[in-house]
Image: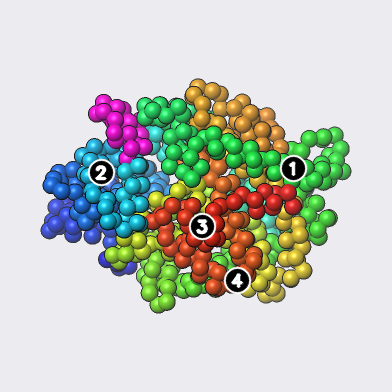
Amino acid sequence: MKLMVSVIFAAGLYGVAFWAQAATVQQQTASFLATPLVAPASAEAVKQRCSSTLQLETTLRKALEARSGPASVAQDFQAFDQLSDVLASGGFEMGVVNSTNPDKAIRDAAQTCSSKLSQLATEVSLSRRIYDRLAAIPTAGLDKPVAYALNITLRNYRLGGVDKDAATRAKVTALQQQITDAGLAFDRNIAEDKSAITLSSVGDLAGMPQDYIDAHKPGADGLIQISTDYPDAFPLLKFASKEAVRKKMYLTFQNRAWPQNDATLKTLIAKRDALARLLGYPSFAALDTADKMIGTPAREKAFLDSIAAAAIKGSERDDALLLAAQKKLIPDETTLQAWNTGYLTNIVQKERYGVDAAQVRQYFTYSKARDGIFALVHDLFGADIRPWQGAHFWASDVQGYELYDQGKLIGRFFLDMHPRAGKFSHAETSPVRVGLASGQIPFGGLICNFPATGPMEHGDVTTFLHEFGHLINFLYSGRQQYVAQSMLNLQWDFIEAPSQLLEEWTWNYDTLKQFATNAKGEPIPAALVAKMNAARHFGEASSWRRQLGFANVSLGYYNQPPGFELAPMWRKLYDAYGPTPTPAGVHPYANFGHLNGYSSHYYTYVWSKAIALDLFTRFKAEGMRNPKVALAYRKAVLDPGGSEDANDLIEHFLGRPMSTEAFKQMLQE
């Protein structure tokens, strides 16, 4: 069953009447899955789609709950998997609309629908009748991947509280809905924040690249507005020579979505804690880690401490150099300040390693980075990426593509890569349809915020490739028999590893020279890339200390009783690992979006980095652009998706269990 390009973005055509006229539930399901609605024409179209989706999901759920007689994989698990596909697909659609649509009324309708879909998903996850049917399936003789998928499904049901009494399940349902609503509000407050700083004259842009100055002209009043969007904020923090300007931007950036997200986050934390305790866990972190590779909050904390010891030791030399540079510029400042570190790092890299970020960025633009990334995944994995003819999206700058493997279509995706009012403000991969061996083609995309024209930071290129790594993992793994075997069911603390592994190629000259060119078309010099690599690890330990600080906040907020004040607790948790103290007057938790989506397991980025560098040891030994190694990696790690335990995927490729030694060594280089 393939997605039909001619109808894939049809708006408002699949309302309640359509389902009433359909001959069978199977036809309804096939039609729904074949026509994802991600570019609705109106809020009413969203409401109609929502009603249709809810009706279909309810029909499938009731049919499964009504089943009787001997349970089997072919009947019961297949029916459950189809219901899971519809549940996931409905949520994915509304997530994309909520994150991307230019029309606020449409976004609001999608957010409302997301809440309703989440409520129904919770009801399914707490259906004792469904659980009992699945638990009654005989496991003798099942293929290992199918048995694994069934076992994971039953475990997830138990973690959701399905084995509790009816009264407890009702409370769980109510709490899950409150958690969903609070999370949606938290994310929306961040996305819709319009913070900016005002500069009095062009003189305040001293030190900025000329293209940045040209793009930020004074208004009629002579003032210059600089938004806190990433393409505006990050270059300013790196290049602006006036400390007051950097400080102003940093403090404003760290106060996005505050104070409105203060109460919202407190609600989110409290409801998650209540849910965990209702299910018999001492904290939400204990519930949250139960299905992860890491297993428990205690092991998570031990891991963070272990990596922090290496990171703190590795950052001591770098900090001394930064302080020396700061002393020359700001003699009275004896402590490294967060708004100075990016600027000082650029100075030290320029003086010590001959690397000037302003010089580096002239070799990168969005379009060149996109083409270079497409070429890279072709060279490594045989990816054949072609324009998606006939696809239409929600904004004119969104592009569609198809992924072929040896002439066979295996996936479709969109790229929504530039800032837009009301749009999700970070960078993420968004699935829309899971691929299946039955012929359902996977469909997803990237939602990012890179400059559409002009120079692009090398760090942005790395982020682009990171997110694209998630996307190709999703697309390549889209040929499993069941949704329960897809990448969606891969342990979440492994999910970042394939993307973090790919980041290494943005430092490889043989890769960069193919697309990194300046305005004259001259490729980036090998000598400059060599200098970039020499300077690369300067500041890297401090960067990972920031990630450790965020991870400690993520764990700490969810591993204790609620009711604490967010700002002082942030300082206690973050500053224990972070490279610079949290400045007074900022509220970074209000815009730390991962406190919703990742909740207590933001450690995933650090844990996955350790896995990524461990996986990279084989590429280092056998060749970064060795197609045989890359194909072996794709077959062992990417293609299986969530059909196997992540520990097994690692061992299949490396021939041994995971080790954190490569990461610790890198931090101390």
Residue extending furthest top?
563
Instruction: Please check the rendered image and state whether residue 549 is part of the magenta-colored stretch, yes or no.
Output: no
Question: Where is residue 617 shown, x and y percent of the image?
Answer: 62, 61
33 or 503, nearer to the observer: 503
Left or right of 570 on screen, residue 483: left
Q: Amino acid at mark 1?
A: Lys
Is 598 on the left or on the right of 123, as rendered? right
Q: Earlier in the sequence, mark 1 or mark 3?
A: 1
- Secondary structure of residue under mark 2: helix
Closer to the N terminus: mark 3 or mark 2?
A: 2
In magenta, the rendered stretch is: 157-176
Do we see residue 199 in this rendering?
A: no
Q: CA distance from mark 1 to mark 2?
A: 50 Å
Q: Residues within 10 Å of mark 3 (few under 14, many from 20)?
A: some
> Which element type, helix, strand or loop, lies under badge 1?
helix
The amino acid pointed to by label 3 is Glu
User: For residue 438, what is the image quadrant?
Assistant: bottom left
**Number of the label disc, if any, that sits on residue 625:** 4
Marks 1 and 3: which is nearer the front?
3
Depth check: 67 or 329 in front? Answer: 67
User: At 42% from the left edge and 77% from the top edge, which residue is drawn?
Assistant: 406
Residue under the image location 19 percent in, 49 percent down: 71
Instruction: Decide: is 517 above or below 46.
Output: below
Residue 651 circle label: 3
Does the magenta-highlighted stretch encompass residue 165?
yes
Circle 3 or circle 4, nearest the eye: 3
Which disc number belongs to residue 313? 1
- The residue lying toward the viewer, choosing from 618 and 515, is 618
